[in-house]
Amino acid sequence: MSSPIISFQNFGFQYTAQAEPTLYEINLDIYPGERVLVAGSSGSGKSTVASCINGLIPFAYPGQSTGKLLVDGKEVKESSIFEMSRSVGTVLQDTDGQFIGLTVGEDIAFALENECVDQEQMKLTVDEVSRLVDIDHHLQHAPHELSGGQKQRVSLAGVMVDEVKVLLFDEPLANLDPAAGKNTIELIEKVQERTKAAVIIIEHRLEDVLWRSVDRIVLMHEGRIVADQRPEELLCSALLTEHGIREPLYLTALKYAGVTVTPEMSPAHVDSLKLTDEQKGMVRTWYQSGKEGKMQSGKAEPLLQVEHLTFGYQQGKNTLEDIDFTIYKGEMISIVGRNGAGKSTLAKLICGFELPVSGRILLEGRDLLNDTIRERAEKIGYVMQNPNQMISKPMIWDEVELALLKMGMTEEERKERVEETLKICGLYPFRKWPVSALSYGQKKRVTIASILVCRPQILILDEPTAGQDYFHYTEIMEFLVELNRQGYTILMVTHDMHLMLEYTPRAIVFSEGKLLADTSAAHVLNSPSLVEKANLKETSLYTLSVSCGVEDPQAFTERFIGYERKEAR
């Protein structure tokens, strides 16, 4: 066997600013050509492991290490970031933070320019790698004009020109629509086949990564490796769920049906699953034993009406075209579709950040066209994806009170409103804390509280669960469900198909600026034609139900959701 390209030997690390170590006794060898998935809940240490491999630790993030870490035969602490970059190429979660060139071609060529490569050779190399990642038709575009999936391709091409021996991906799927995420995993496999590099993927979305095979899953918890196993073995154990990682939906459905999952069943992906006729029968029996009837709901009052809405950032080129739908009081809805479909633009129009070319937006029957952004904000609250982009005050109380300062309220009225809001959001015990002392999930709650304090009728949230592990995902979503029970109407712009299925009975689907569908979430992911047009991805429940001979895949998915809600209670 060849020597490992990465070797952690009793390795530990403690950041200078922290009282306790982040990593303890890490022993891990990764070999050339391997594909390894590193998983773990937030704070498990997986991102720190990545920073050790690419040299950010100790050269950018200082601290004390113990043991040894060898990358490409060199001890990292005796090397440099520049030397490490010759062996390890990193594709960050935030691709925008990785761009340097004014055009795609310039960005891909950046590493070659640093090495003073001949212009002609540089052009040939850029052309070759851009063709490999299918971005060669965009070399003259500015990187920020591209979709999320295209940005990933540019970042990947930029690290490939150096012919590195390790490709490290830090949550590559976090900001991508489902189909773009699927394409990214396929692209990583394609690039690895060509380069023979070791691939390390750090990602929460386990089922999506397993769309293509990985050799091993390294599971981390509280700074230690708790499992280093083949996917077939790990998926048959309870270790994933015990440590805050969601198992693939099809495996959960099999367990609900009483099927014991074993490595011999090839459970790493639903398409490779080997089920006996008896096991397929168990799935059908479980489905038949508790089919959910169609949910009947009384017709609520219309709250928000969007009528024939058209908008374009450039004259003659529409981003949204003739959009028409109604939101009813008390609904909780997902807005989904491919990157660049117009979802975020719709949210901006509803909030008044942009004005339509034509059409109307009505709240309780009244046209909002002449309302200022501030006037709309009293009725419609918008929560951005990244809480750090919303928070402007150092203290929690001040941040939540901020919106009330110009509303003509007395100090006592503001105090009463802020206290009530902090209690609703579970933040009252922290009311005197600095924002900097909070976790990411708690900061998210602060941003929601800062909007909620105005008592809006509608909350619009952009990717409320992006980049969060299963525990924090569930915590935030159950909090939003509780707000919904209290009467708040909630719209969520999301790429998370699990969120859409489990928490929102209704989904509004966009594609290329048009409203493609307004239907149930289960129907969206059980309609192959709709999935393809919207750049989504069929749920693995659909694939499982078809392979088991279930006559109605949509009803099977609804049965699963209903059963899961009962299990959660």
Image (spheres, grey):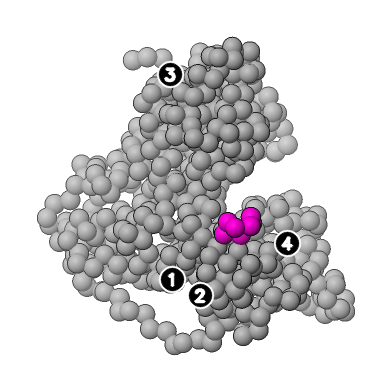
Q: Please, is residue 561 above or below residue 113 in the view?
A: below
Camera-nearest label, 4 or 2: 2
Q: Which residues are magenta?
A: 312-318
Q: Gap between marks 1 and 4, in whole Å?
A: 40 Å
Q: Nearer the viewer, mark 1 or mark 4?
A: 1
Mark closest to the chain's N terminus, 4 or 2? 2
* Percent position of residue 227, x then y: 41, 37
Q: Are marks 1 and 2 in contact (CB under 8 Å)?
A: yes
Q: Nearer the viewer, residue 449 or 342?
A: 342
Query: Of circles 2 and 3, which is in front?
Result: 2
Classified by dominant secondary structure, the portion drawn in magenta counts as loop
Whichever of callouts 1 and 4 sits on the residue coming sooner in the sequence is 4
Q: What label sits on residue 518 in the rendered view?
A: 1
Residue 304 visible in the current orientation: yes
Identify which residue is drawn at 60% across, 44% down. Answer: 145
Q: Which mark is residue 325?
A: 2
What is the distance, in whole Å, between disc 3 and disc 1 at their CAs? 52 Å
Element carrying mark 1: strand
Q: Can residue 221 be seen in the rendering of this structure?
A: no
Mark 2 surroundings: few (<14), some (14-19) or many (≥20) residues within 10 A: some
Give the SS element for disc 2: strand
In the displayed structure, does residue 237 sit left or right of residue 302?
A: left
